[in-house]
Amino acid sequence: MAEETHVTVRLEHPVTVEKVEYSELKLRYPRVRDIRDARKGNPSTDEMNIRLFSNLAEVEPAVIEELVLVDYNRVDEALEPFT
């Protein structure tokens, strides 16, 4: 059986950014370099998470910024076992 390399989070409240609707985010598992890149420049925790989530989902940061809090928290929780 192949090892899973992504986790999919279905959004309770889909968002539209630049005329593209997102009803789910497929996030790849984070690597050390993803954490390092998200921390560059000593950002706030919120900014670091936005950078990390958008990088792992391969979407613009604006997509993460548009999430309602319940969906943002679900993304965060989905990645907890891997951080």
Image: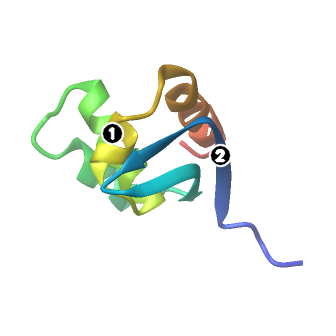
Count every numbered label the image shows and give the total: 2
User: What residue is shown with label 2?
Assistant: 9
In this image, 65 relative to 28: left or right? Answer: left
- Alpha-carbon distance for marks 2 and 1? 15 Å
Which residue ends up furthest to the top in the rendered image? Answer: 69
Q: Is residue 83 left or right of residue 4?
A: left
Horizontal side of residue 61 vs 10, given as left or right: left
Q: Is residue 11 above or below residue 55?
A: above
Work out whether residue 15 or residue 5 is closer to the camera in this orientation and state it: 15
Quadrant in which residue 39 is drawn: top left
Question: Image point 47% across, 57% down: which residue?
Answer: 57
Residue annotated with mark 1:
50
Pointer 2: residues within 10 angstroms few (<14), some, or many (20+)?
Answer: many
Q: Position of residue 38 (x, y in %)?
A: 27, 47
**Mark closest to the chain's N terminus, 2 or 1:** 2
Mark 1 residue type: Ile
Residue 5 x/y as whole percent: 66, 67
Residue at 61% from the left image edge and 31% from the top image edge: 74
